[in-house]
Image (tube, rainbow, N blue to C red):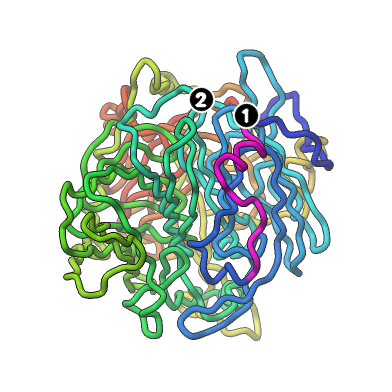
Amino acid sequence: IQGDGWTESSREEGTAVSAMGGLFFKEMGIDRTPPTASQANHPWQQQSVHVGGQYRLAIQMADVTRLCYTKSIITVNGQYPGPTILARDGDRVVVNVVNHVRYNVTIHWYGQPFEHRHGVRQLRSGWADGPAYVTQCPIQSGHSYVYNFTIVGQRGTLFWHAHISWLRTTLHGAIIILPELGVPYPFIKPYEEVPVIFGTHINLLLLLCSFVLASLCYLYAFFAGEWWNADTEVVISQALENGGEPNISDAFTINGLPGDLYNCSAKDTFKLMVRPGESYLLRLINAALNDELFFSIANHTVTVVEVDAAYVKPFEADTMLISAGQTMNVLLQAKPNYPNATFSMRARPYATGSGNFDNTTVAAILEYQNPSSSSSAGFSTELPLYIPVLPAFNDTSFAADFTGRLRSLATAEYPANVPQTVDRRFFFTVGLGTDPCPRNQTCQGPNGTKFSSTVNNISFAVPTTALLQAHFFWQWEGVFTPEFPAFPLMPFNFTGTPPNNTYVSHGTELVVLPFNTSVELVMQDTSILGTESHPLHLHGYNFFVVGEGSGNFDPASDPAEFNLVDPVERNTVGVPDGGWVAIRFLADNPG
C-alpha cells in the first residue's frame, strides 16, 4: 500500500512507554528473570511473561527431549515454546531480537496492524512486520534488530513467530492484549484465562491467569505443536531440493508434550485442573505451519466469543475448527459439582487434500479439583476418563457449518465497518502446480516433476532485496514488478477437470494500491493437482469475510448473497476445499 510518512524502527532500544512496569511485577510476584535452557523441557513452569514495554529476545539453541529422542532446537531465551508478550491496548512495545544461531531470522507479530492512530495522522511502522525480504532483510547470525510498534484498537489473542524458512516450528509465542484499564470484556468475566495455541507446532497455548489488580493475571504459557525427530530445516531443504512433499511430523504436542497416545510419552501429558462452577477463558492459537485443527473437550461445551482478536456474536460449540494462523477465544463453564471423572482434551487435523499428513491425535487431560480434598496438588490416575468424538479428517460439512456461524459482534461500541463500496476487485486462484525437474536430478513430485504453490499460476520468487526497502527508495527495477494479475490470465474450470499443462510461471510480482483503496478479494481453490483447503493470512490488516461457497465463484450471482452487515472480522481465513471465499478491507495501512 502506497503512502508517505514511513519510519524505520530505531536501531537503539530507546525508552518504551507502557502503562505497566516493574512495580506491577513486584506486586504480582512475577519473576521476569529469563528461564534456563532446561526449562524448554517443562514449558508449563515458565513465568517469563512481560507486560508492554521493552523485551530482549535472544535466539539461541537448546536441547529438548521428546519421544525418547533428544535434539537441539532453535528457541527464544532458551524456551520452547517461546515467552508470552502481555500488553494493553495503547501500549508501545519495543523488542530487541538478538540472533545467536547460524540461521538468518526474522519475527512476525501475527495479526498486528502496526499503525499509530490517535485521532491525528501518525507515522506507520510497517518495517516491523517481519517477513524476510518483504519488509526487512533477515537478521544475520551475530546481529540484532529492534522491532518497535504500538498496539492500537486491538484486544485479544495473537501470536508471534519466525518468518523465514521453517524456523517457526519451534520459534513462536503468544501475544495477549488486554483491554484498556476500565474497559470490560463484552462477556462474563472469567475466573481464569487459559490461552491455547495449536500449530505445526500446533501450539495449544494454555495460559492460566488469576484475575487480580484490575483483571491482570499470573500467566503460565502452554503450547501444543508438532514434533519432528529430524531437524526441520533439513526436512524443508530436502523437500525443496527433490520437489516432493515434506516428511510429516512424528507427533503433535500440547504445551510441548506429545501426550499418552504416543509411544514413550505417557509421562509427557499436559494436565489442567479447574474448579467446579467457575468459568475459564480459553485463548486458542493455531500456530501450525499449514494444518487446520479440530479441538474438543470431552463432555464439555464452550461459548465462542472472539476470533483473531475481534469479538463475535457468542455461540456454543462442542468442537472447534481453527485454521493455521487463526486465534479463537472461548468460554468454558466448568461443571457445577465435582464430576468424579477426568476429561480428555484432543486435537487432530482437518485434511482434505490428497497428500500425506500427520493423522495422529494429541491428548491432554482436564481434571476437576476435588472440594473435599485438602490437597490440590497432583492429578488422579484412578478416575474414569471421558474421550471426545472429533469429526472425520475430511468432514467438509462440519467445517462449512462451523465457519458459517461466525458473525461480528457489530454493536455501537464494536462496529463492523465493512466497506459498502469497492474501488478494486481481485480474483486469485490458489493451489498447486508443477515445475520441470532439472537435468541429472530425480524429482519426487507428480510424474517426476516438482510441486510448486501458486496464486493466479504465479509462484513467488524470493528477492535478495527487501521489497519494502526497494519501494521506499524507488529502486524496485530488477527487484520486483508491480504487475501481478488481478485475475487469472488463462481462465479454466477451476474445480473441474484440470488442464493438461500444470506448469507454473515464476516472478516477484506485486499488487500496488493507492492509499485508502477499498478492496474486494475472492480466493478460489483449484483442482489442478487436487482440491484442498488453504489457510491464508493478510499482513497488516484485519478483513471481513463477506462470503464463501463451494465450486466455482460466480461473479454474476454470488455477490448478491454477500453479508455486508455483520460478517466475521479476521486476519486469516481458510479457502474452502473445492470452493471460494470473498473478503473486503480498506487499504489504509501503508506497507
Left or right position of 380 against 290: left
User: Over which residues does the magenta segment extend?
Assistant: 19-37
Three-letter residue code for mark 1: Ala
Residue of label 1:
19
Position of 184 relative to 56 (above/below): above
Tell me the residue at 21%/61% (across/down): 391
Does the residue at mark 2 contact the one at mark 1 (Cβ under 8 Å)? yes
Most extreme residue toward the front, as rendered? 374
Which residue, given by chain and number where applicable, does mark 2 sit on?
A: 181
Residue 247, percent across and down?
48, 77
Q: Percent from the top left, x then y, of residue 129?
A: 65, 43
Residue 14 in which image quadrant: top right
111 w.r.t. 490: above or below: above
- Number of other residues with Cα within 10 Å of mark 2, as a class: few under 14, some 14 to 19, many 20 or more: few
Q: Is residue 195 left or right of residue 320?
A: right
SS for callout 1: loop
User: In the image, is residue 66 part of the stretch drawn in magenta?
Assistant: no
Relative to 588, residue 431 above or below: below
- Secondary element under disc 2, as helix, strand or loop, is loop
Residue 293 in the image, given as x and y percentages of width and height: 35, 58
Residue in view at x 49 percent, y 37 percent? 216
